[in-house]
Image (cartoon, rainbow, N blue to C red):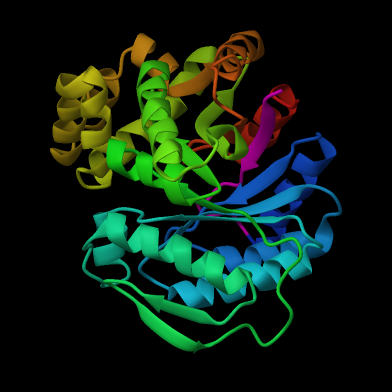
């Protein structure tokens, strides 16, 4: 049975307390897990520690800690600490993020994202095992230390994010799960084939890993308003985050649309960028509309074979009432 998660909003919230309150609300609605992305706002670690303190049962996850701004051993330490703080409810997600954030916010070259992600996954899992970390990779060479405290039992699973064929194959081969983002149903099915191939290359059963699809969702009795918020959100990612998301959409057969949105957004014509996203594509990338429309669309995604969890996220322009209302309407 498909599980339902919530991705806590990364757009500016009034306070940490407001973010934690949303996690408490998600727990009350019966969601399986809350994920906290990390961009250039509040850090995921501090926030998730507070969520762990103020919730009892809901799973917690970092989605996604990028593989450039922290060392992999520090990520392992952090995962072990959050697993302890949450009484075993934590799951860590890793991924390269994108060059716009890595280079312009963290000031680090966006080099070898696949290689770095693979080595991060391997090192983090080694740290969490409690054994001495001896690792000779191309990026990291480590040895002589292990966790000073006992290893977490159970060790938190380590997921990887990926949008392209090779990164998804990597997740299937080395990680405990895959996070999918901004994929149409057909694009998702193509990447699921990559995921299964990666699992086979690693001698693993793909059914033992958790596939999580993140969906940006907005529910409003005024369905047109909900769709406009989604268009604004997708326009920002396709146009304002470099070429990373644009190229991912182009790979799925929407090259003309992806470039039209990107170019209009960067020319300052936000309305043209949003207009380039027609209703059919919007419905393939997100869940928006009236309560009835949104629940029907979400049910379609839940039926895609190979998806274990759907993560309900929210557009950047969503207000508190939008977020809480959407969580309530789409609750499992």
Q: Residue 186: horizontal and vertical position, in percent?
A: 37, 16
Q: Residue 166: horizontal and vertical position, in percent?
A: 29, 42
Q: Residue 250: horizontal and vertical position, in percent?
A: 21, 27
> Image height check: is 312 above or below 154?
above
Q: Which residue is at the front of the view, 140 or 30?
A: 140
> Image height check: is 227 above or below 156?
above
Residue 229 in the figure: left or right of residue 217: left
Q: Residue furthest front?
A: 203
Residue at the location (26% across, 72% down)? 107
> Image height check: is 168 above or below 303?
below
- Residue 258 visible in rendering: yes
> Image height check: is 286 above or below 266?
above
Q: Residue 123: horizontal and vertical position, in percent?
A: 47, 69
Q: Which residue is at the front of the view, 90 or 139?
A: 139
Residue at the location (38% across, 40% down)? 168
Residue 45 in the figure: left or right of residue 20: left
Q: Which residue is at the front of the view, 10 or 83?
A: 83
Q: Residue furthest bottom?
A: 144
Residue 277 in the figure: left or right of residue 7: left
Query: How many labels were placed on the picture?
Result: 0
Q: Is residue 266 inside the magenta stretch?
A: no
Quarter of the image holding residue 79?
bottom right
Tell me where the magenta segment starts and ends, as one range: 1-14
Q: Is residue 11 inside the magenta stretch?
A: yes
Quarter of the image holding residue 326?
top right
Residue at the location (54% across, 14% down)? 223
Residue 207 in the figure: left or right of residue 162: right
- Residue 313 visible in rendering: no
Q: Which residue is at the front of the view, 6 or 274?
A: 6
Quarter of the image with the C terminus is: top right
Q: Label the magenta part by its dominant secondary structure.
A: loop
Residue at the location (27% across, 29% down)? 249
């Amino acid at each position: 049975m498909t599980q339902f998660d919530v991705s806590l909003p990364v757009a500016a919230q009034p306070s940490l307390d407001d973010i934690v309150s949303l996690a408490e609300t998600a727990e009350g609605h019966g969601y399986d897990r809350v994920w906290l992305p990390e961009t250039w706002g509040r850090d995921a670690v501090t926030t998730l520690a507070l969520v762990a303190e103020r919730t009892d049962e809901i799973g917690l996850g970092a989605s996604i800690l990028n593989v450039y701004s922290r060392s992999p051993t520090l990520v392992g330490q952090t995962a072990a600490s959050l697993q302890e703080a949450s009484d075993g409810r934590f799951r860590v997600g890793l991924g390269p993020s994108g060059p716009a954030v890595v280079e312009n916010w963290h000031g680090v070259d966006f080099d070898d994202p696949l290689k770095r992600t693979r080595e991060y996954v391997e090192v983090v899992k080694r740290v969490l095992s409690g054994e001495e970390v001896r690792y000779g990779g191309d990026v990291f060479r480590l040895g002589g230390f292990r966790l000073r405290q006992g290893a977490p039992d159970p060790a938190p699973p380590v997921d990887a994010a990926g949008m392209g064929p090779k990164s998804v194959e990597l997740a299937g081969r080395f990680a405990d799960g895959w996070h999918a983002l901004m994929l149409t149903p057909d694009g998702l099915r193509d990447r699921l084939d990559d995921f299964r191939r990666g699992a086979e290359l690693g001698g693993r059963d793909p059914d033992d890993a958790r596939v999580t699809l993140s969906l940006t969702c907005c529910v409003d009795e005024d369905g047109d308003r909900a769709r406009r918020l989604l268009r604004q959100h997708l326009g920002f990612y396709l146009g304002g985050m470099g070429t990373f998301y644009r190229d991912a959409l182009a790979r799925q057969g929407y090259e003309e649309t992806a470039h039209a949105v990107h170019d209009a957004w960067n020319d300052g014509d936000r309305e043209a960028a949003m207009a380039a996203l027609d209703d059919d594509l919007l419905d393939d990338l997100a869940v928006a509309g009236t309560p009835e429309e949104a629940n029907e669309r979400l049910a379609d995604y839940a039926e895609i074979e190979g998806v274990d969890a759907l993560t309900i996220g929210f557009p950047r322009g969503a207000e508190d009432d939008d977020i809480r209302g959407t969580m309530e309407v789409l609750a499992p």
